[in-house]
Image: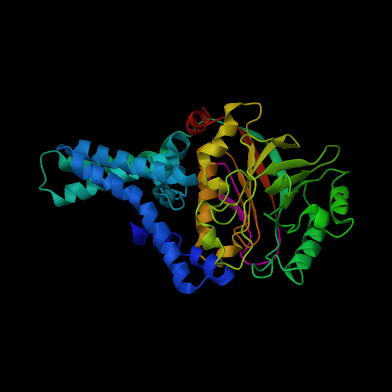
Amino acid sequence: GTAWLCGTFWWLFISMHTYGGLAAPLAALAVLGLAAFLTLYYAFASAMFVRYAPVGRLARAALFASLWLLAELLRGHWFTGFPWGAGGYAHVDGPLATLAPWLGVYGIGAVAAFVAFGLADAARRRPVRGDWAAAAGLIALVALLPWLPAPGGADSGRLPVALLQGNIPQNEKFQPGSGVPQALEWYAEALRWAPAPLVVAPETAIPLLPRSLPEGYWQSLADSFANGHRAALIGVPLGGRAAGYFNSVVGLQPGKAPYRYDKQHLVPFGEFVPPMFRWFTDLMNIPLGDFGRGGPLQAVFEWQGQRLVPNVCYEDLFGEEIGAYFGNAARAPTVLVNVSNIAWFGDTVAIDQHLAISRMRAIEFARPMLRATNTGATAIIDHTGQVTHLFPRHTRGILVGEVEGRTGITPYGWWVSR
């Protein structure tokens, strides 16, 4: 388990060592320690299986799948949760993905565990009457999953969009002599001239608090969307010493006060320091502190007949939090929007993993997902989880495309919103 999880998020080493200045042995130990801690959930599940495993093959497979589900739920929720690389994501392009609108990613993981255990158990035991028939039936069932009827939904119209990817190097991004002026200049021009009714800029695209920006900068941005038929969602830090600081998304549109979304699910060690771990963050040469948490069920950004709900960085990892918006059909999103900066992790598989996570959310809720990122993967994902537009990673530019909003609710969306 530890080796599997180390291989899943080894790229955390880059953020701590390359950008954080933490000594390589300590950064490696930190990744190993996190993986070992998260493995405890699976170790507990394994111990329970050994202790309580029944005799019957079907019952054994069902218990194994149930305990796997329990382990992944605990990993995804306790101590703020870190379900990155949960088993279900491996099936985003497979037949089991058809189950996402019904069971969600954790349910897919449980089904995969049931099938895998059944096959492994059959391989190690002497075949008995009916084994081959059961195996053939299981294979046929999985093969037929792509034809499982998709939950109903309706088209809510099309919206042309422009997604910005600034590709500001992480080692320069917050440097006042290099990355900051570079970001301010490029994003100001891109936001001003992007050729679409909706423009989306990534997490901390504007890397300074509005009061720290050059005089007139923010007002100039607001003026760009004060008239006409364009709106924007822009990643920017907000707040102050008294109220606290927030990792936020600001929405600008004609005739309305600025919209605001504050990130609610913060990254441990990056956006808040867990108790008793300040000594660890003090070893790194990057400004880590405690951000404020946004509340649940924040306002929806409404534009041109669409209801857009932002999420910041790895918030799209927590489908149950996104699902809370579907409890009220009148405010349920028609389009999901993720703004991210995972340049902290270099040009690694983290980019591909995060794209797969967004795709799974799109399938679970039958909603398109827009992704605007600093270095990738900037993309448009349709309501079936297919990537319809993808911008090259680690390049600077604007991805222009069209998104089809959707209404309706999936079974998974219904029960996680309760």
Residue 323 in the magenta stretch? The answer is no
> Residue 272 appears at what percent x and percent y?
58, 52
- Image quarter for residue 379? bottom right
Tell which of 322 and 39 is nearer to you: 39
Q: Residue 107 at what x, y percent from top left?
A: 39, 39
- State how the image is colored: rainbow
Across and down, in percent, residue 254 comes to 85, 40
Q: Quadrant of the N terminus?
A: bottom left
Q: Is residue 59 visible?
A: yes
Q: Which residue: 63% across, 43% down? A: 293
Identify whether 51 is placed above or below 330: below
Q: Which residues are magenta?
A: 381-398
Q: Quadrant of residue 295?
A: top right
Magenta stretch: helix, strand or loop mostly: loop
Q: Specify whether residue 392 is painted magenta.
A: yes
Write the residue at 68% across / 39% down: 308
The residue located at (55%, 48%) in the rendering is: 358
- Is any part of residue 143 visible from this angle? no
Looking at the image, residue 261 sits to the left or right of residue 352; the answer is: right
Question: Residue at the location (61% across, 26% down)?
Answer: 328
Left or right of 224 in this view: 292: left
Res 108 quadrant in image:
top left
Q: Is residue 136 left or right of residue 275?
A: left
Count of numbered tags: 0
- In this view of the protein, which residue sits in the foreground, 142 or 68? 68
- Where does residue 306 sit, x and y in percent of width and height? 70, 36
